[in-house]
Image: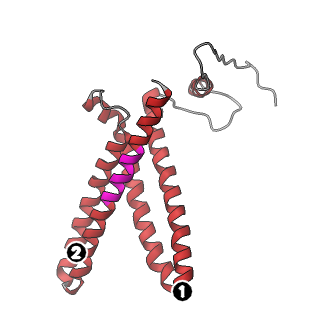
Amino acid sequence: MSCITRITAALVAGAALALGAIAAQITYADIGAVINEARSMPGRRHLLHAIAAALSPPSGTIVHERAMIPTPGRRRRALLRELLPGVIVAAVCWQLLQHLGGFCIDHTLKRTGPLYGVFALMLGLLAWLYIGAQLTIFAAGINVVKARRLWPRSFFADSLRDADRRTLVASAEIEERVPQENVEVDFDSTHQP
């Protein structure tokens, strides 16, 4: 796969994730608006909360599944089976992050003035986006570890396991930039402190 193809695939996946997250957030906001209108009907309010809680995770799962598909030409079912653990982790983490963000905005921004409120909202949004990106990368990493069988791993570099060695070799070989370049990795048999 060429560099331009990889960059294009990454941009398409990022755009799909962004558009899907916006669509899921709009859906979630619409459900929230219906719930806010139903506050005058106490009996139906809990039912609407349950419906919103039931609809949000599947929509998040679909959004992340679409964003994590690297190329459209592969077998669809096998690919979905490979991506399912990371997709579910990403959807659950984004859902929790949305609830946490809503809780922070509701409880923190009430006590701020207009100027500090906007400033706090911008800083909170940047932090929220950073944490969301990190969680999505972590979820995609779950799929890589599963597909390449990169477990069990050692926590410390004292004794490298086979999965550690394969990971380090793959990480070094990624740095090959031209076909004439050859990166070789060798490990010492003894560890020197």
Region rendered in magenta: 14-24
| Main SS category, magenta section | helix
Element type at mark 1: loop
According to the picture, the residue beneath numbered tag 1 turns out to be 113
Q: Nearer the viewer, residue 112 or 155?
A: 112
Q: Which mark is residue 34?
A: 2
Query: 161 above or below 139?
Result: above
Q: Nearer the viewer, residue 6 or 45?
A: 6
Q: Nearer the viewer, residue 101 or 146?
A: 101
Confirm whether the magenta stretch covers residue 103.
Answer: no
Counting residues from the start of the chain, the first of labels 1 and 2 encountered is: 2
Which amino acid type corresponds to the residue marked 1 in the rendered image? Gly
Query: 189 above or below 25?
Result: above
Location of residue 157 (image quadrant): top right
Q: Residue 12 location in percent, x, y?
A: 39, 41
Q: Residue 126 location in percent, x, y?
A: 53, 62
Tell me what residue is drawn at x 51 percent, y 72 percent.
121
In front of the other: label 1 or label 2?
A: 1
User: From mark 1 to mark 2, how far is it between C-alphas?
Assistant: 28 Å
Q: How is the image coloured?
A: secondary structure
Q: In the rendered view of the protein, which quadrant contains the C terminus?
A: top right
146 sits to left or right of 42:
right
Location of residue 167 (image quadrant): top right
Question: Furthest-right residue in view?
Answer: 193
Q: Badges 1 and 2: C-beta atoms under 8 Å apart?
A: no
Q: Residue 183 location in percent, x, y?
A: 65, 18
Which amino acid type corresponds to the residue marked 2 in the rendered image? Val
Q: Is residue 157 visible?
A: yes
Q: In the rendered view of the protein, which quadrant contains the N terminus?
A: top left
Tell me what residue is drawn at x 24 percent, y 61 percent.
54
114 sits to left or right of 18:
right
